[in-house]
Image (spheres, grey):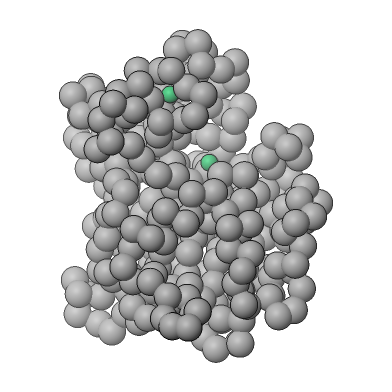
Amino acid sequence: MPQWNCGCAHCTAARSKPQLRRLQASIAVSADGERWLIANVTPDIRHQITAFDKLVPAPPRRSPIAAVVLSDANIDHAFGLLELRQAERLSIYSTETVRDVLLAGCSALRPFAKPPNAWHIIGDSPVHVNDASGLPVGLRVRGIDVGGITPQFDGGRDVTGAAVGILVNDGAHRLLYAPCVGAMTDPLRRELALADAAFLDGTFYTEHELQAQALGTRTSRQMGHLPISGDGGTLPVVVGLGGKHRYYTHINNSNPVLDPASDALHALRDAGWMIAEDGLAFSLSKEAGSASGARR
Ligand SMILES: [Zn+2]
Ligand SMILES: [Zn+2]
C-alpha cells in the first residue's frame, strides 16, 4: 500500500503519510538465526530483504537466504523470484501444481527448476529444508490443504495443490503461514489448534468489499480468499486458535482493519488476533527455552 493505480481512502492516505505504507506479505524463518527460509517471494522482496538486518549478505556475495517456500503461484507471492535470479544456487519448495503453473506461466522462472538450483515438491508429509548444497537448515515444511484456486493468469482453477498453508516445524515449534485460504478445511483447523504462531489470510474483511468500494467486481471467495467476517468468515472460527502469536496477514488496501479506529480492527483484537505489520519479529525459542525458532 499504496497500490500504484488505486485512489481508495487507504491508498490515498498512504501516499501522504509514509508511515501508513505497507510492503507485500512475506516472512523469513530461521532455526539458527544464520540461514533463512523465505515464505513467499514478493515482487518487492528487495525492499523486504534490505529492511531486515539478518538478511544482509556476507562478502563477496553470499546471502543468508538458503531456501524459499511458496504457498501458491500468485504473482504477488512468487514473482519476486525474478528479483532473486542472481542467486548462485537456490532451493525452492512448493506443491507440484504451484511449480507447474509458475513454469508454464513464466519461462523466465525455468532456470530455478534446473541445477544448480533445485525445486522440491511439498505435500502432506514433512520435507526437510535443505540449502542448494543439500545441507539441512533445521526446518521442515509441509503443505496444508486450504482449498485455494490457481491465479487468474492460470484461469483460477480449483485443483489440488493450487494453494496451501505452509507449516514450518523446527522439531520444537510449529509456525503456520497461510495467506491464501479458500476454505476452512479440517487440516487447517487442526494446524491452527497446534500452532505456536499463525499467519492467516486477512485479505478482505467482507465478501463484497471490492464491489462496495467500486474497486473491483469479484467477491472475496471468487478471488480465493475467505473473508475475515460475515457468513463463513474466518474470525469466529479462529478465536482461541493460532498459539501465542496470531496475525492476519496479506491485508488488501480495501480492508477496513487498516484503519486503527475501525470497528473491524476492534473486532479482530477482541478475538485475540492482530494484523501483521512490516518489520514484525519474534522468537519462539526464547519463550519455550529451547534451541531454535524464528528470531531476529
Ligand atoms: Zn487502494
Ligand atoms: Zn497475494
Q: Residue at x 27, y 54 (%)?
A: 280
Residue 275 is situated, as x and y percent measured from the top left of the image, at 30, 41
Q: Residue 119, how many percent across, how many down?
A: 69, 70
Q: In which quadrant of the rendered image does the N terminus lie?
A: top left
102 shown above or below 202: below
Query: Closest to the observer: 221 or 256?
Result: 256
Q: Quadrant location of ligand 1? A: top left
Q: Answer left or right for 270 relative to 150.
A: left
Answer with left or right where residue 118 lies relative to residue 293. Answer: right
Whether residue 185 is situated above or below residue 68 in the rendered picture: above
Q: Is residue 23 left or right of residue 14?
A: right
Residue situated in front as seen by the camera: 86 or 254: 86
Outermost residue on the front side: it is 60
Res 190 seen here: no
Q: In the image, is 193 to the left or to the right of 46? A: left
Quadrant of res 96:
bottom right
Q: In this view, does 80 lie above or below 3?
A: below
Residue 180 location (% of width, % of height): 53, 43
Q: In which quarter of the image is the C terminus?
A: bottom left
Residue situated in front as seen by the camera: 55 or 148: 55
In which quarter of the view is residue 285 placed? bottom left
* Residue 96 in view: yes
Residue for point 33% across, 71% down? 54
- The residue at the point 41 percent across, 81 percent down is 58
**Residue 59 spot, x, y in % from top left:** 43, 83
